[in-house]
Image: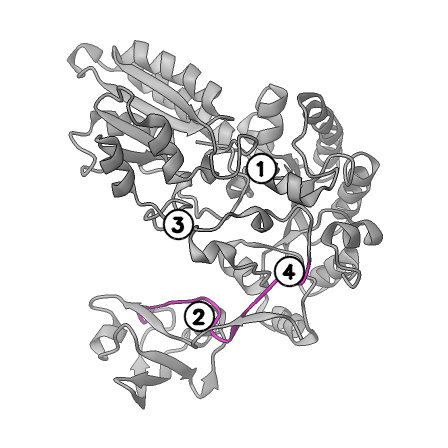
């Protein structure tokens, strides 16, 4: 049986005002047990079962079991949000990867970060990457019947023995046999390879990419560098648990360019995408937007820098067309991960000139995981406080939205934006894109939202290379 983490089934977190559920008297804390007489296991069952025009819920309301019937349009929502996505249990990981980032998490972070989930349902619902090593036959039957597509799968290597070694799981099934089965039931797959120097690169990477390209289910292949903290490397003692050198990053890019050319010739798409971190580490040119085929793995650090640069290009054209004499001069500080800081600094210099303003970019060293972890999305709130406090920060501080959780409430170390703002004695705002940063510059206060609305990230990927 797969390991799981039990939760209280179907507990309602919020009820939308004016919704059908609100009119029926349902409220947070109530519990949904069944829909149309069928027990529900998770959000997926809830979505499937509530598409009918007549829906009956079995609920626990005010401590008593009862029934609520709704007559509605087939696709009309009831207005219920649950505390958890998996009501019966969350499937936990049965692997022991030496490069697992969760092993390096220090104490004192958000509790949810320590849950080592490997649940195909969360992959379908939220895009989490899973290994498919803990599936039962019932899980396969469910994926086929409900057509849970697409799924995000961590492959790492297609050679069976190498993959088992990477996962430290001698019972891990053949991933290519699983890929063929997914293709047979009509489930598309987005794949990920965490590349460890000297372990699954070189010829092993060639085989992995070749095998995945041959499978009908595979829509794209992301190759991301191993997340290597000094602490994690010291405890792992595995030679592959280290950062790629610039020369190694350049070699990976050359190798994957050959596969990109092959994919474009054979299927008309790039398909194979190196993570932004490889380009930044190699100081290589960032590919054009068309290379990313619509950015299907943007939240995995694939194409974030390109969207940043293109956003800046559009913003620059707009700024040049404006009458800047009427624009107020601003002084502000932008803090970010060390990896993206040189790129942001170049943009800040141009922006400062165009707006007759002063923008300082401050690279923040990661004090939680060590300087080797240099991306914005893994910076704790305390690092911003420690390295910005005492500086002349100007009128406000802009921080990367990727450093907050999905809801924008907490940093990795559970500090809040208010905690950081009060510690710095300066207003703090957050942005995804440079155009959003410009809007914050024009806003009268951090309580006034910027006009620009950026694409949102749900913080699912460890490999956040962008701003």
Give the labeled residue for mark 3. Answer: 406
Q: Residue at x 37, y 12 (%)?
A: 349
**Residue 342 screen position, x and y as percent:** 48, 19
Task: Please tell me how crowded label 1 is: few (under 14), some (14-19), or many (20+) other residues with Cα within 10 Å.
Answer: some
Count of numbered labels shown in the rendering: 4
Q: Residue at x 28, y 14 (%)?
A: 358
* Residue nearer the viewer, 146 or 430: 430
Q: Earlier in the sequence, mark 2 or mark 1?
A: 2
Which callout, 2 or 1, points to the residue nearer the camera?
A: 2
The dominant secondary structure in magenta is loop
Dot 2 falls on a residue whose secondary structure is helix
Q: CA distance from mark 4 to mark 2?
A: 18 Å
Question: Are the residues at dot 4 and dot 3 in contact (C-beta closer than 8 Å)?
Answer: no
Task: Please tell me how crowded label 4 is: few (under 14), some (14-19), or many (20+) other residues with Cα within 10 Å.
Answer: many
On residue 293, the disc is 1
Give the labeled residue for mark 2. Answer: 47
Q: Earlier in the sequence, mark 4 or mark 1?
A: 4
For residue 428, side relative to residue 206 (left or right): left
Q: CA distance from mark 2 to mark 1?
A: 29 Å
Q: CA distance from mark 4 to mark 1?
A: 20 Å
* Residue nearer the viewer, 284 or 19: 284
Q: Earlier in the sequence, mark 4 or mark 2?
A: 2
Q: Quadrant of the C terminus?
A: top left
Which residues are the magenta region? Answer: 77-95
Dot 1 falls on a residue whose secondary structure is loop
Dot 3 falls on a residue whose secondary structure is loop
Q: Earlier in the sequence, mark 4 or mark 3?
A: 4
Give the labeled residue for mark 4. Answer: 187
């Amino acid at each position: 049986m797969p390991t799981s983490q039990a939760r209280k089934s179907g507990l309602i977190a919020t009820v939308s005002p004016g919704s059908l559920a609100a009119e029926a008297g349902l409220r947070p804390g109530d519990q949904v047990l069944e829909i149309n007489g069928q027990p529900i296991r998770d959000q997926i069952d809830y979505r499937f079962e509530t598409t009918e025009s007549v829906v009956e819920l079995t609920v626990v309301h005010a401590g008593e079991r009862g029934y609520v019937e709704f007559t509605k349009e087939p696709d009309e929502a009831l207005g219920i949000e649950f505390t958890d996505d998996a009501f019966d249990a969350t499937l936990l990981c049965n692997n022991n990867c030496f490069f697992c980032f969760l092993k390096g998490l220090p104490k004192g972070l958000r509790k949810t970060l320590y849950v080592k989930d490997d649940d195909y349902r969360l992959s379908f619902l939220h895009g989490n990457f899973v290994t498919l090593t803990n599936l039962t036959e019932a899980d396969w039957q469910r994926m086929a019947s409900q057509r849970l597509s697409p799924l995000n799968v961590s492959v790492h290597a297609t050679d069976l023995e190498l993959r088992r070694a990477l996962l430290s799981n001698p019972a891990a099934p053949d991933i290519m046999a699983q890929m063929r089965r997914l293709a047979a039931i009509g489930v598309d797959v987005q794949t990920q390879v965490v590349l460890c120097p000297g372990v699954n690169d070189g010829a092993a990477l060639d085989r992995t990419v070749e095998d995945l390209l041959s499978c009908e289910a595979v829509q794209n292949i992301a190759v991301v560098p191993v997340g290597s903290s000094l602490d994690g490397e010291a405890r792992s003692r595995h030679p592959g648990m280290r950062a790629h050198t610039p020369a190694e990053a350049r070699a990976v890019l050359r190798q994957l360019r050959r596969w990109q050319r092959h994919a474009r010739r054979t299927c008309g798409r790039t398909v194979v995408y190196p993570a932004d971190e490889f380009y930044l580490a190699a100081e290589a040119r960032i590919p054009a937007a068309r290379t990313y085929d619509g950015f299907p793995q943007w939240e995995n650090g694939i194409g974030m820098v390109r969207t940043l640069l293109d956003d800046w290009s559009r913003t620059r054209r707009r700024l040049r067309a404006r009458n800047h004499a009427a624009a107020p001069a601003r002084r502000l500080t932008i803090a970010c991960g060390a990896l993206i800081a040189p790129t942001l600094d170049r943009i800040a210099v141009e922006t400062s000139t165009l707006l007759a303003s002063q923008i300082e970019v401050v690279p923040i060293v990661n004090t939680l995981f060590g300087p080797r972890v240099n991306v914005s999305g893994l910076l704790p709130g305390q690092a911003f406080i420690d390295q910005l406090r005492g500086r002349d920060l100007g009128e406000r501080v802009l921080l990367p939205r990727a450093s907050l959780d999905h809801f924008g409430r907490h940093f990795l170390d559970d500090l809040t934006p208010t905690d950081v703002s009060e510690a710095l004695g300066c207003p703090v705002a957050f942005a995804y894109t440079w155009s959003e940063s410009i809007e914050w510059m024009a806003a009268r206060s951090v309580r006034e939202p910027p006009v620009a609305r950026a694409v949102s990230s749900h913080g699912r990927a460890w490999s956040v290379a962008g701003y």
